[in-house]
Image: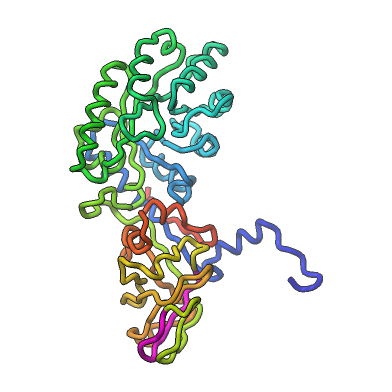
């Protein structure tokens, strides 16, 4: 900062970050594709309600724009992970039904009542606390009960669910809005765990005959329409990720990430690029330097991808990563692309129609969920309208 220069207000800084010409990367979200993914799942399961999981800021893509687009399309039930996420969502969509997956924090039932949130009760202790709060306040508030059928994370164990089914005095204090469980291996439809969990869920569900039920996540919603029950809970499929580990992706791409060329430079044969000198030019080369790196969620592990060759898409061709991805910069080899097709300020597709989120995840040694939720805050974020 120059002497006498005042620091720009936060609003001014935020406005500058929204200017694509000043951004190292641009993140585009196709809300029409998002809505079409939601509708595709709903069409495949016409007897059930299709909800939407928008936790973790809608998998990193922006809960506000995503939830509003889905609500406009007809979605009325949403799942978040944390109470704060739920309160933020209710401020945007006051009439939405919002379930909080992480459950009821000790002593915070009043927060849920105030913001009209529904806790997913994950333990007998949480059920007791919610029922007691309802009794003390002479209210019959809604909640979900989560039964663990084999995931062994959150949820009542089957024997606890059976005991709860016999506690009519407890159950009448609140409104059981949903009985749910979560599949561990739905992305592999042939895995024996799926049938075992469904069998357990069917057994428990029979003990709560009047409660709406939910078992299906993204993969199960598409693989087994007969498992739709009353409510579907798609997540990754809405955002264009492949819900399956062993079959082609049936969903439309939602996210496109562009990096900006800061410079195209000549590198002589034998010279190295980047930290650690891990890449040595096998010939005289042209290298494009993109203005994004691991601070933006472009995983450093892509640099030495065992699942490669990892690449971006630029000027109608693929260009491989070279050297190590650093905090703010990434290098790609554009030697095979005509120089007149490259320019400072040009965009390179890092993820999108030609480089899927699942491909990028494979190169990074991770999954699409982690790629999306790691996307940084420095991108200019652009949302295409839904067209409605």
Residue 271 image position (x, y, % from top left): 45, 88
Residue 230 image position (x, y, % from top left): 29, 28
Q: Residue at x 81, y 70 (%)?
A: 4
Q: Give the residues in magenta.
A: 279-292
Residue 367, above or below 348? above
| Extreme-right residue of the structure | 4
Q: Residue at x 41, y 56 (%)?
A: 371
Question: Does the stretch in magenta take in 286?
Answer: yes
Residue 8, above or below 246? below
> Which is nearer the eye, 360 or 142?
360
> Which is nearer the eye, 277 or 146?
277
| Quarter of the N terminus within the rendering | bottom right
Q: Residue at x 41, y 86 (%)?
A: 286
Residue 307 image position (x, y, % from top left): 30, 65
Residue 333, above or below 203? below
Question: Does the stretch in magenta take in 141?
Answer: no
> Which is nearer the eye, 315 or 99?
99
Horizontally, residue 65 falls left or right of residue 367, namely right
């Amino acid at each position: 900062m120059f002497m006498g220069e005042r620091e720009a207000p936060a609003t001014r800084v935020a406005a500058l970050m929204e200017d694509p010409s000043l951004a190292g990367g641009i993140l585009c979200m196709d809300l029409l594709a998002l809505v079409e993914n939601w509708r595709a799942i709903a069409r495949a399961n016409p007897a059930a309600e299709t909800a939407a999981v928008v936790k973790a800021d809608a998998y990193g893509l922006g809960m506000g724009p995503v939830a509003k687009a889905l609500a406009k399309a007809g979605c009325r039930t949403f799942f978040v992970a944390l109470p704060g996420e739920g309160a933020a969502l209710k401020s945007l969509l006051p009439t939405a039904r919002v379930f909080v997956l992480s459950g009821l924090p000790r002593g915070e039932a009043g927060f849920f009542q105030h913001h009209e949130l529904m806790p997913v009760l994950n333990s007998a202790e949480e059920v007791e606390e919610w029922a007691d709060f309802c009794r003390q306040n002479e209210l019959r508030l809604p909640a979900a009960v989560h039964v663990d059928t084999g995931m062994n994370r959150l949820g009542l164990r089957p024997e606890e669910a059976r005991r709860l089914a016999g506690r009519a005095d407890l159950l009448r204090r609140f409104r059981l809005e949903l009985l749910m469980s979560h599949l561990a291996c739905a992305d592999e439809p042939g895995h024996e765990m799926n049938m075992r969990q469904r069998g357990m869920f069917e057994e428990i569900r029979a003990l709560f005959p009047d409660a709406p039920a939910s078992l299906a996540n993204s993969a199960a919603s598409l693989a087994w329409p007969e498992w739709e029950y009353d409510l579907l809970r798609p997540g990754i499929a809405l955002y264009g990720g492949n819900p399956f580990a062993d079959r082609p992706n049936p969903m439309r791409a939602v996210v496109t990430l562009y990096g900006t060329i800061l410079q195209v430079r000549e590198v002589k044969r034998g010279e190295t690029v980047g930290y650690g000198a891990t890449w040595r030019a096998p010939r005289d080369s042209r290298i494009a330097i993109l203005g994004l790196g691991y601070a933006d969620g472009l995983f450093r592990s892509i640099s030495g991808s065992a699942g490669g060759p990892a690449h971006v898409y630029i000027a109608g061709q693929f260009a491989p990563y070279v050297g190590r991805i650093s905090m703010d910069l990434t290098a790609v080899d554009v030697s095979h692309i005509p120089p007149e097709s490259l320019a400072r300020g040009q965009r390179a597709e890092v993820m999108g129609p030609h480089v899927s989120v699942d491909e990028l995840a494979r190169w990074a040694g991770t999954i699409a969920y982690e790629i999306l939720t790691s996307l940084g805050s420095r991108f200019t974020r652009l949302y295409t309208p839904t067209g409605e």
